[in-house]
Amino acid sequence: MQRISLLLLALVVCSATALQAQAPKPDPELRKLHAWLGHWTYAVEYNPGPLGPAGKHTGEQTVRMTLGGFFLETRVVEKTPAGEGEELEIIGYDPVNKNFTLSLYEKGGDTYSGTFTVTTNRVAWTVQSAVAAKSYQIRGTDIYAADWMSFTRKAEVSTDGKTWTPSYEKRFTKVQPAPKR
């Protein structure tokens, strides 16, 4: 009986070791996003358009890897004349289509979903949004400085997918160290 118990224990240990060796790992493409990790501040200038009036706002965002390194989580707080806005963005990698996917949720219920690609220090992105129960398309680029400590994001918006108008420009600066949670 003791022999059977030892044999079963050995099988369990071997099975657990084999399962650990086969555990999925985050796609190596996600490493491209590691430069984004940390705490950032930004200033944004909105143009008048379908998403709202012109205005200058400030904000900050904290970026971290989550769910075992498979996703990037960004939490944003933006100060506006109407009060404080909040966003939660989740980014993952789609190995089939070879692009990153994003889902963004704003305080107030607005949602955005889209894709983007990363090439060296440039990020090109497109999103479909549902803002105030209306659908919009937004596209833009992020250009990172050589030291990855700042970047500029420019965006355009369209109500029909054919006519595009400038929507906003944001200038980000990385703050060191990232605040502890």
Image: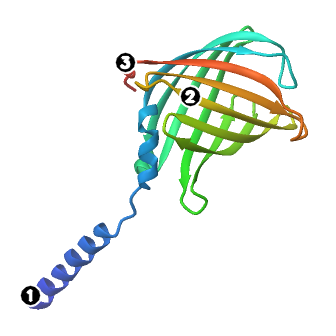
Q: Amino acid at mark 2?
A: Ile
Q: Nearer the viewer, mark 1 or mark 2?
A: 2
User: Secondary structure beneath disc 1?
Assistant: helix
Depth check: give the residue in front, 75 or 4.
Answer: 75
Given residues 27 and 71, the one toward you in this image is 27
Taking 83 as reference, is 85 above or below it? below
- The residue wearing badge 2 is 143
Q: Residues within 10 Å of mark 3 (few under 14, many from 20)?
A: few
Q: Nearer the viewer, mark 2 or mark 3?
A: 2
Q: Residue at x 64, y 32 (%)?
A: 141
Please, what secondary structure does the residue beneath circle 3 have?
A: loop
Name the residue that disc number 1 marks. 2
What is the x, y in percent for residue 137?
80, 38
Q: Which residue does the numbered mark 3 point to in the structure image? A: 176
Q: Position of residue 87 (x, y in %)?
A: 63, 29
Marks 1 and 2, how far apart in space?
Answer: 66 Å
Type of residue at label 3? Gln
The percent position of residue 40, horizontal first and vertical second, equals 49, 21
Between the residue at mark 3 and the residue at mark 1, the CA separation in whole angstroms equals: 58 Å
Chain-order first, disc 1 or disc 2: 1
Decide: marks 3, 1 in contact (CB < 8 A)? no
Residue furthest left in the image: 2
Point out the tag, 3 or 1, that comes first from the N-terminus: 1
Q: Are marks 1 and 2 in contact (CB under 8 Å)?
A: no
Q: Residues within 10 Å of mark 2 (few under 14, many from 20)?
A: some
Q: Is residue 118 left or right of residue 50?
A: left
